[in-house]
Image (tube, helix red, strand yellow):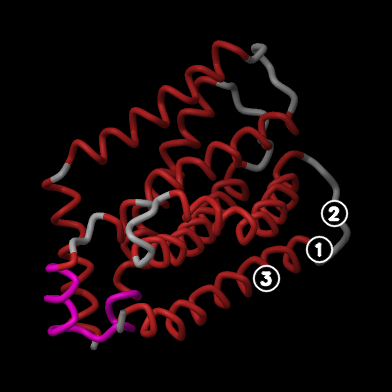
Amino acid sequence: MYQRIIALLKKDILLELRQQHTFYGILLYIASTVYVLHLSMPDNPDADVWNSLFWVIQLFVCVNTVAKSFLQESRGRMLYFYTIASPVEFIIAKLLFNLLLMLLMSIVSLVLFYILLNNPVNDGFKFIGIVLLGGISLSLVFSVMSAIAAKAQHNAALIAILGFPVILPQLLLLMRLSKSAFQEVFREGAILQLAGLIGLLDLLVIVMAVILFPYLWKE
């Protein structure tokens, strides 16, 4: 099972390396969006504004990054995967690939925000950890939404329609948690509770994907 998951993960990585125009397109989208914010924002934006803008940009970056995950798979290729792997192996490989790709894009976004929009963060290491946790959460949710949309005649609009109501609670929790890196005082244990709640939501998404995807796989 693990060997097949790794093989499927390597397949996605090799396809991404061969189709570099899509990867660079996402990087250009991130750079241009942050640069437009740089031109339109004051030199030292308020910490709350900076934090909110960062997570909104992360949301749209994730949609553009993860949306093509299942939509790029043709029917013939899916039939081939049906013969060599189980649905659980396939969805786990997809989740891992999107997770790694979103973590990379999150780091790129954070570096550009630091360079172009100054850096109001007081605890950089804590904020980086929260950004990585947020990248994982966003990628998991929209990976599942992409799988559903791929079975609905490849309608990419469904990703946004289905994904935003699901991701909204996690996004609000991430915004609240990230404020702990901006000198906002939290009561003792509150940060661990918020991080644990986000982790439980991520685990719930993984369990739902493993349980529900086999039914989509049969269609």
Residue type pointed to by label 3 = Gly
- Identify residue for label 2: 186
Q: Position of residue 186 (x, y in %)?
A: 85, 54
Q: Is residue 196 left or right of residue 134?
A: right
Left or right relative to 80: residue 118: right
Alpha-carbon neighbours of circle 2 within 10 Å: few (<14), some, or many (≥20)?
Answer: few
User: Marks 2 and 1, Cα distance to the nearest angstrom?
Assistant: 6 Å
Outermost residue toward the front in this view: 153
Going by the image, does 200 lie left or right of 149? right
Is label 2 in a helix, a strand or a loop? loop
Asked if 24 appears above or below 143 in the picture, the reply is above
Magenta-drawn segment: 76-91
**Residue, disc 1:** 190
Tell me how far mark 2 sits from mark 3, CA to CA: 15 Å
- Name the residue beneath numbered marker 3: 196
Which residue type carries mark 2? Phe
